[in-house]
Amino acid sequence: MQKITRIVVTGGPCAGKSTAMSWIRNAFAQRGYTVLFVPETATELITGGVAPWTCGTNVEYQKCQVELQLTKERLFMQAARTMSSDKILIVCDRGVMDNKAYMNDAEFAEVMDALGLDEIQCRDSYDAVFHLVTAANGASAFYNLDNNGARYETAEEAVVLDDRLLSCWTGHRHLRVIDNSTGFEEKMRRLEKEIAEFLGENHPYEMERKFLIAYPDVAKLDNNPLCRRVEIEQIYLKSSGGEEIRIRRRGENGHYIYYETRKRPLDGMKRISTETSLTEEEYRRLAKSADPAKHPIRKNRYCLNYDMQYFEIDLYPFWQDQAILEIELADENEEIRFPSYITVIREVTGDPAYKNAALAGI
């Protein structure tokens, strides 16, 4: 069957997105993918004379940009479905949520309302998001404005904008940050590796570490622009052969996406994991096959960006003094840098008592 995957490559100014597009095309064409690119809409409009400073207001400009971006994405998806290739990768040079970084909250709400859009659907409709950190943060000697006529930010402004863009995507279930801790070519290789692992090309397993932590300062998390609270309902289905099957409703304030996840343990922190999107109707139908020995889990998840790492902190209604923190790794020996306001009690990776399936029996 044909599989179409749609990802976003985003990041601050002078982060390497243009080079990344060429790198992705070459790397994944060799892996048998038909690779399609949705070009950056802001650059198209601004270089064509349509800009926030030429339109009546920034809101009017943003309405044009978001509508054009969505139209392009829809047409690329429509075209992909007609192609004979069984593996298609659609790469969006920025996604709809990038536009939020250039508006205040009131302006963004006005644009969403005018176009009949929902923020959660806009963020979570993409399969994965890969954020390239601006060269101004960690590789400032290479920051310049030469290769993009629509770019105007100073290095200091670029760092601030990079954080704003990252904040817009925080809460997505598969967000990866590619920093400047290595040379540029290695940065591109790391991006390729992250995409390949997401697609299941290198290996179809996820690698997580899990920690029991003291109950965090929720007010601090809520006030952190690089942290986003997500509501999760998780239902375990009847299964056999050691496979874990769950369906999940994920979102905020009554706006949700739905998907099914199947997991099978390998060893240590490695698990084979596959995910399939569901409609609300499919979710409700599958929920009728829930495992009677396990209760539905309802929890608040805080997705936290900290020091180029993406943490997930789960708060359960039956715990008032502790919580679970998880981080997905590219390498099992990768260093983890915890925020100072997180108190780790102990690592519980691989401890069956702290698996969600076990907690569903509480």
Image (cartoon, rainbow, N blue to C red):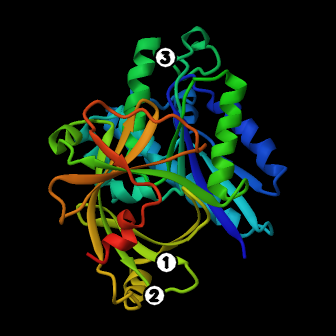
* SS at circle 1: strand
- Residue drawn at point x = 79 percent, y = 66 percent: 85
Q: CA distance from mark 2 to mark 3?
A: 55 Å
**Is residue 169 visible in this depiction of the protein?**
no
- In the picture of the structure, the residue carrying the numbered disc 2 is 238
- In the picture of the structure, the residue carrying the numbered disc 1 is 245
Mark toward the start of the polypeptide (2 vs 3)? 3
Residue 73 at what x, y percent from top left?
A: 57, 55
Q: Nearer the viewer, residue 173 or 115?
A: 173
* Amino acid at circle 1: Ile
> In the picture, residue 353 is in which quadrant?
bottom left
Mark toward the start of the polypeptide (1 vs 3)? 3
Is disc 2 in contact with disc 3, using a CB cutoff of under 8 Å? no
Is disc 2 in contact with disc 1, using a CB cutoff of under 8 Å? yes
* Amino acid at circle 2: Lys
**Location of the C terminus (image quadrant):** bottom left
> In the picture, residue 349 is in which quadrant?
bottom left
Residue 90 at what x, y percent from top left?
A: 65, 54
Looking at the image, the residue that sits furthest to the right is 30
- In the picture of the structure, the residue carrying the numbered disc 3 is 152
Residue 304 at what x, y percent from top left?
A: 35, 42
Marks 1 and 3: which is nearer the front? Answer: 1
User: Left of 302 or right of it: where is 28?
Assistant: right
Q: Nearer the viewer, residue 215 or 288?
A: 215
User: Left of 340 or right of it: where is 196?
Assistant: right
**Is residue 192 visible in this depiction of the protein?**
yes
Q: Is residue 140 above or below residue 110?
A: above
* Amino acid at circle 3: Tyr
**Location of the N terminus (image quadrant):** bottom right
* SS at circle 3: loop
Crowd band around label 3 with a 10 angstrom C-alpha radius: few (<14), some (14–19), many (20+)? few
- Residue drawn at point x = 34 percent, y = 54 percent: 119
